[in-house]
Amino acid sequence: MAPADQRAGQTRRVGGGVRCQCGDLAYFGVLVVVSVVPVQEGWSALAVGLLMLPGALLGVLVFFAVDPVIRRIGAGRTVTLAAVCATVAVLTSLVSLWVSP
């Protein structure tokens, strides 16, 4: 029998008392917002699906790549690297708003 923290549907504690499912909930919120806002702006469902396709493909690639990274540099440094990458992505999108006419 698997330990309690590895059973399906269970959350497990990570550094600082953060729970793993918080990230899942935030990602679900992003998916809802990314799909609802363009539809309200008049985009078709196909266009919204194509808009979300690169992120889905990237998620599949990261799924397979993250285990070796965790083994090589550790979980804490991997989370820090992910946070830095997310921050750079957000700042890049903000710069595009400042630069666009």
Image (spheres, grey):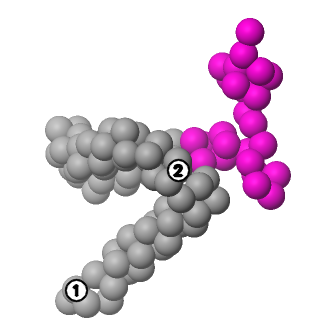
**Residue at the extreme front of the image, as rendered:** 72
Please tell me whether residue 58 belongs to the stretch shown in magenta: no
**Nearest to viewer (mark 1 / mark 2):** 2
Is residue 35 found left or right of 16 in the rendered image? left
Q: Residue at x 52, y 48 (%)?
A: 71
Q: CA distance from mark 1 to mark 2?
A: 38 Å
Question: Dot 2 corresponds to which residue?
Answer: 70
Viewer-proximal residue among 2 and 97: 2
Residues shaded magenta? 1-25
Viewer-proximal residue among 3 and 7: 3
Question: Dot 1 corresponds to which residue?
Answer: 100
Quadrant position of the N terminus in the picture: top right
Q: Residue at x 59, y 55 (%)?
A: 74
Is residue 71 found left or right of 63 in the rendered image? right
Residue 96: % across, % down: 28, 81
Establish if 84 lies above or below 55: below
Type of amino acid at the residue the image marks with label 2: Ile
Residue 72: % across, % down: 50, 54
Residue 9: % across, % down: 68, 23
